Amino acid sequence: MPLEVYLNVAIGGILTGLVYGLMALGLSVIFGVVRVVNFAHGEMMTIAMYIAVLLSSGFHLDPLILLIPIAAVLFVFGYALQTSLINPFITRPEYVQFLLLVALAIIITNTLLIIFGPDARSVQTLYALESFQVGAMIIDAAKVYAAAAAIVFAAALFAFFRLTLVGKAIRACADNHTGALVVGLDVKRLYALTFGLGAACVGAAGTMLVLIIDVTPMLGPSYTLLAFVIVITGGLGSMPGALVGGVLIGVTEALAGLLFTPSAKSMFAFGILVLVLLFRPQGILGKRQT
Amino acid sequence: MTRIGMLADRRRVLAGAAAAAATLAAPAVLRAQGGALKVGVLLPRSGYEAGIGQDCQRGANIAPAILKSMGLPDLTLMNGDTESNVDTARARAEQLINEGAQLLIGAFDSGQSTAIAQVAEQKGIPFVINIAAAPPITEQGYKFVFRNFPTAPMILGDAFADQKEIFAITGAAPKSVVFMHVNDTYGTSMAKGIGAVMPKFDMPYTIAEEIAYDPAARDLSVEVAKAKATGADALLVVSRLNDAMLLTRELVKQRWTPQAILSMGPGWYEDQYFKTLGKLSDGPISFVPWYDPHKKLTPVLEAALAKADPGVNLNTNHVFTFEALLIAADAYKRAGSTDPKALADALRTTNITDNVSIGPGIAFDAKGQNDKVKDGGIQNRGGKIVTLAPKEAANAKPEWPLPSYLSRG
């Protein structure tokens, strides 16, 4: 098989993996600070995808333009969810939190099924079927735009956590919950902000992902699982780890499909996860807990 | 009231209750002599097959009025949703029979149809399968199960014969194909069937590579890149709707227009494929059980569908669901009774020539299988479907090769 076929597939895997990484980044941020595992993560992304489809078809707006507004909507959704529903469960056992979020995921999936029906929906853009020819390689234009937007959004989030006071306060909460309370930080509000930011990440990722794949109500669970695979591979709670994990899983799936059989792509992604759990349980960029 | 009187009253009440219970418990079919035949229509209206189940329902909805205009008896449709689930299909079949269904039709899916067939046989209620291709359903020695749809080997045999007919008309044929298929039960059984049946037909092409993919795949870029890299002339596919759309998009993005797309399954001729892809939907050739455009009942069905569901093209789902009800009404007329045994006896002697699907008509062999029904080779043209083969059903010449995706505007 010619070399450009491998390069084509690997580049496609990297581009898709960056969008996956942004989605998983939201899960990692939420867990890293709030210590709640969001089992409704993929379902929240599906909400963002449907908003993108509705606004795109209704107002002929490009999902790239809708990226920030939809991220903002999901931020509000995440903030409200944390303050109203999740905060009361923060101190409860983990299995209770698990049941709460799984219940939320089921409600979201079935609500979307009632509203939109089972058929797949997509956005129509001018570049949906375009590709760039670079030498002998043909690169999907929609994936390039989606990956670029994912990088910009992730960079903005990194900057927020590094450079702003609120970002530093959230990191302080993540580092030492008791210390944050002692110095007078409003931890519950910061938790809500963090959950909002995680939801915004997944909102942005969903808006970009709808450029690459069609959305159905049943999409959520598989992407929740994918987000877990990525963050555990990259390192739970590590922001760069989520992006690295996303790219690794994206490339692994793509090359496994090419070199072996496409129907076994997911098997190789899970294979990577098993190897990481065996040899580096804290994840590629995660910190070993003492 | 005396003691004896009280006992007598109690006995009367008990006897009355027993009689009432016996009446309620008796099979509903015995209470429903004459009038309209109650037909339980079992389809996957929700779940992952919802789109196709709802499409089949369109064929059921337009049937009673057409059948009445043909002088056939009235039918009362009792709808049951299998929820695309085998266990639910079984439960709904039992429920419909308990509610008085005198005959069942359905259920689009082989697994669900198998479950319903077991219930129908156990309860002694005739079951007419509209769509299901798994051969074992009519190999069980059932007395109440009838299928007006070709089995997978019949579909494949006709598909290869139709392909050779098309190649003969065009004077061109691919030398090699890449075979892409979903790796679900249907896709893998078709793949096995192709491996077994193809050598008997001395096809002009070889299979350069077989690529199986996940039916839930959201991105088929790798699969198409791999297929393109084989350098094969054409694509041979067994897919479903969503993956048919994904494959088409990837062909456009990866700038590959094969000589032909030869589909041996659903997806490529369905309305949503046309609506979603517009001009890009033109060209694929599908080999499926289809309607004969020359039969006199076909325009009647097309007109009824156009009135009930404007913009929807007549397809396999409508035709075979309609024909299942046609078979039911015909059997009821000849049986003159709703007695299930009389209905089953009438079904066994079915001989309908005024039908819609390709082939000489509808008649069942000793196993309850219509062995006369045929596939058609159909091509997408400008949002419509034309029939290319077999020649007795053809209404257009093949457009060959597939027009380039890059020049479609």
Image (cartoon, coloured by chain):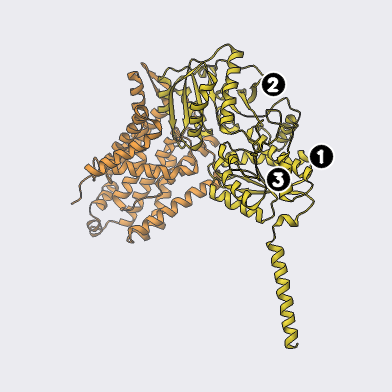
In this orientation, which residue lies closer to the viewer: A182 or B163? Answer: B163
Colour assignment, chain A: orange
Counting from the top left corner in percent of width and height, residue B396 is at 66, 18
Counting from the top left corner in percent of width and height, residue B370 is at 66, 34
The residue shown at (42%, 39%) is A206
- Marker disc for residue B133: none
Q: Which residue is mark 2?
A: B392
Circle 3 Cα neighbour tier, 10 Å, few/some/many (<14 / 14–19 / ≥20): many
Residue at mark 1 shares a chain with residue at mark 2 = yes
Colour assignment, chain B: yellow
Do the residues bearing badges 1 and 3 touch, measured as CB atoms within 8 Å? no
Q: Quadrant of residue B388?
A: top right
Instruction: Compute the Cα span from label 1 to label 3.
Output: 21 Å
Q: Which residue is mark 1?
A: B71
Nearer to us: label 1 or label 3: 3
Q: Chain of mark 3?
A: B
Counting from the top left corner in percent of width and height, residue B22 is at 70, 65
The answer to whether residue B333 is visible is: yes
In this orientation, which residue lies closer to the viewer: B129 or B302? Answer: B129
Q: Chain of mark 2?
A: B
Identify residue type, mark 2. Answer: Glu
Question: Which tag, 1 or 3, sits closer to the chain's start?
Answer: 1
